[in-house]
Each structure stands twice: as C-alpha cells, then as structure tokens.
Image: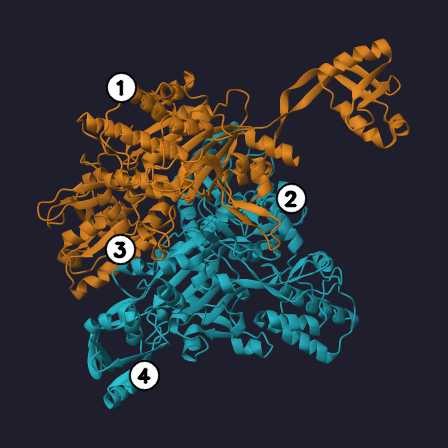
Chain colours: A cyan, B orange
C-alpha cells in the first residue's frame, strides 16, 4: 500500500540510519535493556521526553485552552465491573494463533498480512520486477521465511490484494478460514497453527489485600470521563455541548509487539470526549471557522472496493455530501489536522481513513483515523470516533446513575399515552410478598400492550399480565385493582443521553511519525553526511544552543549570563563549550533538533552583539542581545518564523558555521 | 503530636466544610463513584487537574530547567526480575493483621497507633481535660470504638507516648508484641487478631499473552532512572555530578487506604536522582547559594528520646554540625523548601524530619522528609533519601552492565599488589576441561591469600588451591604453572559507583496540603461565610475571571476580545456573564482560587479601561487594557506581586465587588 518514503529533502528514507540517530541521541531506548528488555516497552530519554512534554503542551493549548474543555485526570486502575459494562472485558481482544508444537504465538491478522505480502513480493521477484521494501529487509526476511520467487496466477494476485485491502475487516473465524484457504502456517517451522482464539488485551491485577477485587489497567482514558459526566455537566452549569479531555497513560497487552515505538504496551494518550445533543444534526458552533480546511479523505466504500485512493475535499463539502456524517465529527477532523501541522507533521503525509464496519471498536458508530505516512506504511495516529450514546447508556443502565441531560423545553411537549392507575392499597393484602414484583411488571408494560389490555379490561373486567417468577408466570388483575386510560401528559423538561464524538490521540505514535517527517540529511562537502531533525521551535526539545567561539575564559561569563536570561524566559538551552569546531558543535545539535544557535565571538565581548543561527537554512543574523532574545522568544512562541526574523535583522556571513 | 490546625486567617480549620468545597467544586472526586467507588482511588476534576498541571510545570522549571537535569520518561510496567534485584519483591511491604473470624484486614502500625491514641483520649476525658480532635470526630468514633473515659496510670501514659513517638520504627514482630502486651484487638468485634504478616504493596500483572513474564506496576519512578544510568552518563558527556528526573504515576496497593487524598493507591510522583562521587564529602557546587536558608529540623535522636521538638537551623550550619550528613543532601533540602514556598505552602507549616533506622526504606542510608502540617497531622510530602550506591550496585551485580563512572586520574595511582602469572599453554594439557574453572578460581584469589601462597610456592615449589566442583575440591599447582610476585601497577583511570541523593515528591499529597494551607473563610456582613483558596497566581487553576457589569449585549464583544487576548498569552480565564451580582460571581471564583478578576463596566465601553481585582485583598486598580494585560502577565509569571502592581496602577473604589 505504501510507497518507499522520502525525507523532507527528497532523498530516500533509510530507517536503520534514522533509528540509530534516535537511539544514539537518547530520544528513546528499550526499557530494561540491561535485563534483556521487554518487547513493546520503551523509555524516552531527555530529548524524547522534552519533545513529548512540548507536544503535550501544544495539545493542551490547541484543544483544552482554546476550546475551554474540562480537563480531568482519572485513575488507570479500573475495577472489573466498569470494564465489563463498557464491553472491554468481552470485546477488547485480538485474535491469536498458537503453534501447538513450539508454543509460539502469532497475531492472526498480522500473520495473514505478512505471508500474503511476502508471496506477492516473491511473485514480483519471479517476474523480474523491482521489489519495494517498506520494511527493514533484514528483519523481514528473518521473520517471514516464505519470500521465495514463485510466480502467482493473476487471479490469485487479485485475490490477495483484495484480502490485504480489507485485512482490518475480518473476524476470528474469517481469519481462520483465510489461513486454511491460503495454507498459512508458522513461517519458521511450517507447522499448522491452531484456529484463532480471542486474547483480551487488558493487563489484569488485583486491588487491595484480599484479592477479591479484580481490576485492569485502563485500555483508554475515556471511561473515567464518562463516569464523571454528571459532575462535569454540573461543573459546566448544565450548558451543552461541552467537552472533557484527559492526558494520561493507557495500556494494551499486545500479543507480539514490534514496529518499535508504533506498537507498544504502555502509551500516552490524549483524549477528548465531546458531548453533543443527538438531535438537530450534531451541529458545531465553530464549524464555519474550519469549513475551508482541505483534508485527504479515504472513505469506507473506496476501501471495500479494494482501493486506497484519497480525495482532497474541503471539510465543509465532505459534511454537506454526507461523506463525513456531521459537523461535529467534521469540525474535529479539521482541528486534528491543524494540530498535526502546527507541531510539524509533513502536510503531504496525512490522510483521513474511515473505518470499515467490522474494524470499528465495539462502541463506535462511525470512525475516521488520521493516518500518517512513515517507512512502516500509513499509521493510525488519531482516531476520531462517534461513540453515539453507547457508553453513557450502558453505565446508566448498570448503575442507575442519571448520565443524561435535563433541559427545559422552550415549548412544553404534549404526549398522548396510555396511563395505568393501580390501587396499591389492595395489592399487599391480595399478593403478599409478590406485590412489588407485580407492580413493577405492570409499570413496565409498553404503550402497545397497554392499549390492547385496556380493551380486554373493558370487555372482560380483568386482564392477564405476564410476571416471571411469580406463580406460573401469569397474574390476573381485575377492575378493582387496575385502570388503564388514554391521557395527555405535558412534558416541560426534555431528557436525553448525549452522543459522544471522541478524538483520541496516540501521543507516542505522533511523536514517532513527527520524528520521521522531520528527519533529513544535510549534504556535506567535507566529511560524512549529517542528520538533521527539523522540529518547529515550538516543540523542539532544546530551543537554543550557546557556543563560545573560543575556549578563552573571557567567554564563560557572557555565555552563563545568556543561558540564565533564556532560562528566566522559560527557554531551554544548552551550552557547548567543548573544543570541537563551531561547525561540528552545530552539527551535533542539528541531530537533536535544536532550531537556534547563538555564537558568542570576540565582537560580542566588545559590543554585546551576537549572531543567531537558523538550523534549517544555516543562515545567521547579527543584532544586540535584546533583539536576539526578543527574536528567540517570538520564534519559540510560534509568533514569527525565520523568514520574518531574518527579514528584519541584519544578515551575518562572518563565520563558517554550517 | 499535632495541635488543631488553623487557617491562614487564624480561624480553626474545619475539615468537613473544606472537603465539601473541594468536592462541590470538583477539585477531586472519588473514582468510580457511581459504581460505589474504590478506596484509595480519586480523580481530579478541572480545577484540581489544572492545579496539578501548574504545580508540575513549576516543579519542572524549579528543578529540571534551572538545574539542567536530564528528564526521562520510563514505563510503569516493570518485569519481576528488576524489582526482585532492587529488593522490592522482598521488602516493599506493610504489616497486616487479619481478624480470623470476620476476615477483616488491618494495617498493624495504624491499628496500634489508633488504639493507643484513643486510649490516651479516654484518659483525658476521664481526667476532665479538653480532648483535641485532629481527626474528624464522627469518623474516629466509628472507626475505633474504644474511646471510653478510662483513667490510665501515669506510667502507662508515658509508655504509650513513647510507643507513639516511634511508631514508624517497629518491625512486624515488634508490632505483634505490642498488640499482645497492650491487648490490642479488632476495635469493632473485640476479636483477637492473627500476628502481623508482610503484605507486598506492589500490584502484580502478567506481560504478554503466554503469562510467563510476571511484572508489577512500579512502586517508584527511580528504578527506570537507575537502569538508564550508563546512557544518561554518556548523554551528559561523562560529566559528573548530574541528576536525572522523572514525573509519572507510581502505585502502592495500600492495605486499607483512608485519609482521603493523602493515602492513595495510584499517585503522581516527581523524582530526582542526583548522582554524586562518594569521595570528597559529597560537596555540591551550588551549596553556597542556599547556605543561609533556614529549615525546621527534627532529627533522629530527638525522636528516639520520645520528643518532636524542631530546631530552626540554617542549612549551612546543619551540614557543618553534621546534623545533615553532607552538602548535596543539604542543598536539596533547601531547594525543596524553596519550591514548596514558591507554590504557596504555608512557611509556618513545614518541617524536615529525619527517618529512624527501622523506618527507612531498604535502600536508604539516610533520609529526611519534608513534612507539611495539616488537619491530619504532619504529612510526609517529599522524601530526600541518600540511597548510597545501593541500587546501581545491585543492578550491576545482577546484570553485569557497567553502571559506574570511569574517570581519568589527575595523578596516576600506583598500587602495590601481588600479581599472578599462569602458563596457560600448559593448563589445557594438564587439566583438560577443568582448565578454565581452575584459572578463574586462581584469578579470584584475594591479596591476602596470594601473599601467603607466594611463600608456600617459594618454600615448597607448589601450592594447593581450593576449586569447588573440580575433583575433591583441591587442586595442586607447581612452579611450572604459576608464579606469584609483588609488583607495582599504575592506574590512570578511576572507577567508582556513584552515590544517589534522591528527592522524591508526592505531588498528590503536596496538592492536598497546599489546598488546606490556602483555604480560609472571608467574614461577610451580609450573608453566609465565603470560602477562599488563596493560591499564588503562578499555580492557580484559572488565572482571571472576566465579568461584565451588565448582561447588555454591548458587553459581549469586549469580554470575548479580552478572553481571546489572555488565551493568546497562555493565560487561562473564565467568563461569568450570568445575572448574579458581581459580588456573588467573585465569591464563586474565590472558592476556585482564581486570583484576578477583570470587570467590564460602562466606562470600559467608552474609554477602554478596565478594573483589575485582587482576590485576597479584594482591592481593585483601574487602567488601560494594555496596562491591565501587562500586569496580569507579570503576576502570573511570578515577576510582580499585588503590592507592586497596586503601587504603580491607580486604585479604584467604584463598585462594591467584595
């Protein structure tokens, strides 16, 4: 599906080189590496951690602050009952197959995908075509031993391609059938595998010392927000619509995690639950602000036809044409794209893909993913689901808590309905302990039944009502006990369960894609090629590198002064006063994504002016300390870009600092 | 130990009123409340969540940014082996007692403490003295049914008081003995309890689908930092000392959590691991900056003598006198206090208490806690432990990873030592497969043994070496095979395992104490008393309240403009355009801790000036929009206080907005 990716500079992206930069510079590192590591667990080192904090900060400003969302922080530990009700205990699972001889475990959909893809590659090899390698070739060959140059029938190729386009749409039984049909086995041993079984992806634990309260680590931050709905609505003084938001870790006990930072067992999420009235077309008051934003859309029908062609569509048009269901969903798709662009994602590597029916989570009525293109293919980074009233309804039904909105009607509503009057005083003496059960069964009768029974009552003077667990399950009630009449009821209040639109961000995945999109290699005449991570100043881990031109002690004090002044303004900076050449010192920090550099040279000591260097262009300007500090602040706050700064401050061509 | 606490305004602190404010305004709420709740789990609502984010931000600036720490983000899921090595599997436990008849479980130390305290109260009642109630009296009586007015012997009172002063110093056996000696039973049933057993406080889970990798939720963020030590040292270009830092959730499966937000099962920590050379007295380069800072110290000896008297001591003096062990520990104690004061903790309610020997965590060589005074007594909020080389050593021994510092010696070190030369070519033919084992045993011989054996070799031409698992465990080596000689070796490099000073912050506890310290009640002539939370502007959840004087539509646009301008500057704000009186609107936001308020009145519409109100004094100034915005920015950045702002901007006495 994916073509070979290229860097910002247009050169081919080589993942091994890129990944070695990330590790060497401690953007991330496998957790517990000195103990052999645990697959699917990674730590962020200082630059990764700072990048993460800055992206989270940008997220909070873009969504929580700018849209007045109610941010909450709920626990990760979650008791069994909550996740049983939400459906996660029964349905939050992947399909796994076991090799009965070796005990090895595979994730079924991934295995089918890999084997079919490798057969298609084998076919291309057999036909003498060039094989595109989106995966690390060494690893691929080791993982799937089936790549052999075997030519396939054209009809088989078409079948395989059709299966691959819908790979996310199969359930366990269907995956099992595919494995039989296409003879898919353990690639290493060629053993036949057992049929797929569901494996629940939640980490289980026990809360408290007596082990009688089973619990899980939350699989999403959403449930805590739903359970607090009523209090949040109160906090918001009953105003609808409103959104809550939460930033925190969630957990997924992946069957066999790989793909590095993209498929991990513990991950940072940022989730929004926007609560909206289901009536009136789910309009959004600020939809006009984003109506013009163009998105690359890949809808459900296109995928089901076996294609992956995107269509560039302004979100206003997409909602009008019904491609995207409603304004609120559309509003958030556009806002998601604006956020991704703000933090530096490559605009040419974003698309929005609609989920197919079987692919959707059990709670979703519709879902679009923001996918980012990487060397691993298109990666789901933000899900934007319409969870309808699913969650609030199941929790309300289970607990009886009123997770709903009560709204005064502008016009009172008149409802014609069949009402039942019971002479409750006579119920006790007549039915003894069954009285309450019978009352409840009668109150629960539908309008249809009530109408029918009212005729029976009129005609026969008595009716028969089904009441499970009482006598033979049928109870006779006569006119003395019951009356059924059609009356008009006036409703001044409207009660409804809000629908939920949920933009859900995988921060770790976004960080990885952002790093891939930001990476390029600066050609160099003199020595080896130099990696650069072109993060925007707003999210870059360190904002400014401070380099003295000389190791002479006179330079120490002005450098320390500058560092302190930047820190006071909340601008992170690093001093490199090593004896390496200025060019080398800048190169080291290009690799860390540091966007700006100040050189303190001999002229600085005399007249207090400094040069400011832009990482991407390596151009420099020279100005007074005050002007340099102001320019840095403005660049880091995202108020100006380098073009603006270099247009107003004098260029400097003095040192060779590329 | 604690006297009844008072609010900022000097009035008695009534916890029930305070707690109802926190819950009503959604600072926090019990997690899963609609499911009946889970003890020890709480969620933060919007104001609590914002307060937390601001305190974390202040922490990051005060420590990470200002001291150039290396922040990392490690996983919470931790495999068994790591926590087995660190000692947590064996030693991270509390003592619990079971009532064999009811199955009820008690934390042994808490039970002893409660029962003895309630007996002391009963004694005071019997003597007709006033009983101080630091606990909610209703709850207390329900919890411990033993409060009956029984007079105790003076010697018994002294014994009880002595036990209580050392309550944290007993192990399980000693607690069991105390329970027998003082006949401490289940207060509700009077049943005798089983002897205390250790209950491990970690939440256990299984990583991956095959259940063969047991793991835990981390009990502290520290271990991840230790395991990454070598990489961090590389990242820091081998410079020592340096500190890593981490902010994240940790977990503790409390036996029977209570005390609300103070004892919870999932909590946010911020931990620093400062790595320092153990030689040279653990000096700190910036100690002079804090030498003058005065701390209230309660050292170990005072507590062991059964007292809790603090001594106000400048940290410089405390280190000189050896009360605090070294400069680095002292530096952090002072920095901790400066941080607590910066976020608004009451300076009269801080003390630093040294741990007693048995109380210390298994890894600690010394430990001081910053404790804050609350209505629950003195609460440990920051621990500052000297973990010596404990953790790095155990992990290095277990994994063989070089968790140490290699440093070029200024002066090469000359070491006289007994060296062994083996003729390895002859080892194979002579000993066959045992050759390697024997070699290893010889290389491992101590200097003492080598000296002794060199004499044997000289005298007898052969020696006997113990080699377990080879033959009868003794191996003879003659002159042809071995030579032992005293020589001088020159060491250019020094290798050492750094010691770790660890300031560890319980952010949730700090937030709770901060809220207690900030709370007071404004006397009011007209209606009921009004609660105020006097957070400093830097950490307040919402910075500015915007109130239009009238609901006239002309006010809508300037209010929205102001809100937008504040948001662009990153300043959170809330509009209250309800029809309530200005005074009432301010009162509502005093309770949320909003420090500043802008009133838009008719004059504002005409000349663009606004009034700015200070929450604590309720004083107002009036100035142009630009001046008001600048003043707000300066107050929120902590650059100016209200006194400074009100001194330079004209006072306004117009409206009644108290």
The residue nearer to you, when weighing B558 against B488, is B488
Precedes in sequence: disc 4 or disc 2: 2
* Above/below status of A421 relative to B280: below
Left or right, B626 with respect to B456, comes to left
**B137 up-or-down from B476: above or below:** below
In the image, is residue B211 above or below residue B153?
below
- The residues bearing labels 1 and 2 have C-alpha atoms spaced at a distance of 61 Å
User: Same chain for marks 1 and 4?
Assistant: no
Which residue has dot 4 on it?
Answer: A449
Residue B283 place in picture, x, y as percent: 48, 23
Q: Of helix, strand and loop, which one carries label 4?
A: helix
Q: Nearer the viewer, mark 2 or mark 3?
A: 2
Q: Which mark is residue A36?
A: 2
- Marks 3 and 1 belong to one chain: yes
Query: What's the mark number on residue B277?
Result: none
Answer left or right for A190 relative to A598.
right
**Which one is nearer the viewer's eye here, A569 or B535?**
B535
Q: What residue lies at 38% left-to-right and 52% top-to-bottom? A: A73
How far separated are the C-alphas under marks 2 and 3?
51 Å
Q: What's the mark number on residue B154?
A: 1
Where is residue A267? Give x, y as percent. 51, 53
Q: Could you give the CA–CA distance between mark 3 and mark 4, rounded to whole angstroms?
A: 52 Å
Number of the front mark, 4 or 2: 4
Could you say which is closer to the camera, residue A99 or residue B480?
A: A99
* Other residues around mark 3 within 10 Å, as few (<14) / some (14–19) / many (≥20): some
């Amino acid at each position: 599906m994916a073509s070979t990716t290229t860097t910002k500079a247009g050169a081919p992206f080589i993942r091994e080189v890129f990944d070695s930069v990330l590790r060497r510079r401690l953007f991330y590192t496998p957790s517990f590496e000195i103990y052999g590591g645990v697959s699917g667990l990674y730590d962020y080192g200082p630059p990764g951690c700072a990048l993460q904090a800055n992206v989270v900060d940008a997220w909070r400003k873009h969504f929580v602050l700018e849209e007045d969302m109610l941010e909450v922080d709920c626990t990760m530990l979650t008791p069994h009952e909550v996740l049983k009700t939400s459906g996660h205990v029964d349905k939050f699972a992947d399909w796994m197959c076991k090799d009965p001889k070796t005990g090895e475990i595979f994730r079924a959909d991934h295995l089918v995908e890999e084997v079919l893809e490798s057969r298609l590659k084998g076919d291309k090899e057999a036909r003498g075509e060039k094989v595109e390698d989106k995966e690390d070739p060494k690893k691929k060959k080791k993982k799937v031993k089936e790549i052999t140059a075997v030519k396939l029938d054209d009809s088989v190729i078409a079948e395989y391609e059709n299966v691959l386009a819908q790979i996310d749409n199969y359930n366990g039984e269907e995956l099992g059938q595919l494995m039989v049909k296409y003879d898919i086995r353990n690639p290493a041993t060629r053993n036949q595998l057992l049929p797929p079984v569901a494996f629940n992806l939640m980490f289980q634990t026990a809360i408290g010392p007596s082990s009688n309260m089973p619990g899980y680590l939350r699989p999403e931050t959403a449930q805590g927000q739903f359970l607090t709905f009523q209090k949040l609505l109160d906090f918001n003084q009953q105003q609808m619509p409103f959104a809550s938001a939460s930033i925190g870790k969630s957990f997924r006990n992946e069957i066999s995690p790989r793909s590095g930072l993209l498929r991990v067992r513990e991950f940072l999420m940022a989730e929004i639950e926007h609560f909206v009235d289901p009536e009136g077309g789910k309009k959004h008051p600020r939809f006009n602000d984003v109506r013009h934003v163009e998105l690359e859309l890949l809808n459900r029908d296109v995928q089901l036809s076996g294609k992956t062609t995107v269509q560039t569509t302004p979100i206003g048009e997409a909602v009008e044409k019904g491609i995207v269901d409603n304004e609120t969903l559309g509003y958030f798709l556009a806002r998601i794209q604006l956020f991704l662009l703000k933090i530096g994602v490559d605009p040419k590597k974003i698309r929005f893909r609609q989920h197919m029916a079987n692919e959707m989570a059990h709670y979703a009525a519709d879902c679009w993913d923001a996918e980012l293109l990487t060397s691993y293919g298109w990666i789901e980074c933000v899900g934007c689901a319409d969870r309808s009233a699913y969650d609030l309804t199941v929790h309300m039904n289970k607990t009886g808590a009123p997770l709903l909105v009560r709204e005064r009607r502008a016009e009172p509503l008149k409802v014609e309905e069949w009402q039942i009057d019971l002479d409750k005083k006579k119920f006790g003496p007549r039915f003894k302990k069954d009285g309450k059960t019978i009352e409840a069964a009668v109150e629960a009768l539908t309008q249809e039944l009530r109408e029918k029974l009212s005729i029976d009552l009129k005609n026969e003077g008595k009716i028969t009502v089904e009441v499970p667990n009482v006598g033979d399950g049928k109870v006779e009630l006569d006119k003395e006990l019951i009356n059924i009449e059609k009356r008009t009821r006036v409703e001044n209040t409207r009660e409804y369960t809000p629908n939920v639109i949920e933009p859900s961000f995988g921060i770790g995945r976004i960080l990885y894609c952002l790093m891939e999109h930001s990476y390029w290699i600066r050609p160099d005449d003199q020595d080896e090629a130099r990696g650069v991570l072109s993060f925007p100043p707003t999210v870059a881990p360190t904002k400014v590198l401070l380099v003295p031109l000389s190791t002479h002690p006179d330079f120490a004090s002005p450098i320390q002064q500058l560092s302190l002044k930047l820190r006071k303004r909340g601008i992170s900076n690093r001093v490199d006063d090593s004896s390496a050449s200025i060019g080398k010192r800048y190169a080291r920090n290009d690799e860390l994504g540091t966007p700006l550099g100040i050189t303190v040279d001999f002229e600085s000591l005399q007249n207090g002016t400094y040069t400011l260097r832009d990482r991407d262009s390596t151009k420099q300007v020279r100005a007074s300390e005050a002007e340099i500090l102001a320019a840095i602040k403005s660049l880091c706050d995202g108020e100006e870009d380098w073009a603006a700064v270099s247009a107003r401050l004098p260029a400097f061509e003095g040192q060779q600092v590329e």
